Image: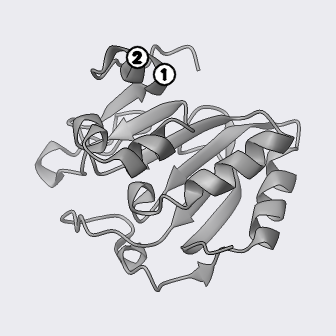
Amino acid sequence: MNYGNYAQIRPLDVANGPGIRVSVFVTGCSRKCKNCFNEPYQDPAFGEAWTDETTETLIKYLSRPEVAGLTLLGGEPMENTWLRRVLADVKKQIPTSVWIYSGYTFEEILDDPEKVKLLESCDVLVDGPFVEAKKNLKLAFRGSENQRILDIPKSLQAHTAIKKERDE
């Protein structure tokens, strides 16, 4: 199976979504946001190649009772649409909440059918580029005030961005 690269998997992460999560940081990003917190991850050749064994490890991490869900970050997950296949394999074995972070806005994602297919496999989108001038360290799960936390199913159904209620 042909996948892309990833930089790291955090088996226990409390910074990138509610509860204890497993976070996957993919590599490759053409957005090049100023002062990106993961600049080395912009290079698609950085990190290790994702394999079927990596998917098995991810499922093992997600199977632990203390884990609330999966978070996809980067790099740029929307430039790694192979993640759709990984999510399909994961969800066959374990139901899990999926948060995805993207420098693309919801509206930009809607313009690309491949990105939309990946989005459909997820539950919550934190969208928009990091903007240094709007940086706010007090924000939960976001780096700058322009970024939104969106309910993906509701947003896709309405074809407009709908913010996630704080129940998750």
Question: Mark 1 packing: few (<14 Cα in 10 Å), some, or many (20+)?
Answer: some
Asked if 128 appears above or below 23 in the picture, the reply is above
Say the numbered circle drawn on residue 153: 1
Q: Which kind of residue does numbered mark 2 sit on?
A: Gln
- Up/down of 146 relative to 39, above or below: above
Left/right placement of residue 107 relative to residue 16 reads left
In the image, which disc is placed on residue 157? 2
Side (left or right) of 104 relative to 78: left
Tell me how far mark 1 sits from mark 2, CA to CA. Answer: 6 Å
Q: Quadrant of residue 5?
A: bottom right
Q: Tell me: 9 left or right of 105.
A: right
Tag of residue 4: none
Out of 125 and 166, give the one closest to the viewer: 125
Can you give x and y, in whole percent of width and height, for residue 24 in the image?
60, 59
Residue 116 in the image: above or below residue 76 = above
Residue 19: image location, x then y, percent: 66, 33
Under mark 1, the amino acid is Pro
Q: Which of 27/92 is in front?
A: 92
Q: Is residue 43 left or right of residue 83?
A: left
Disc 1 to disc 2: CB gap under 8 Å: yes
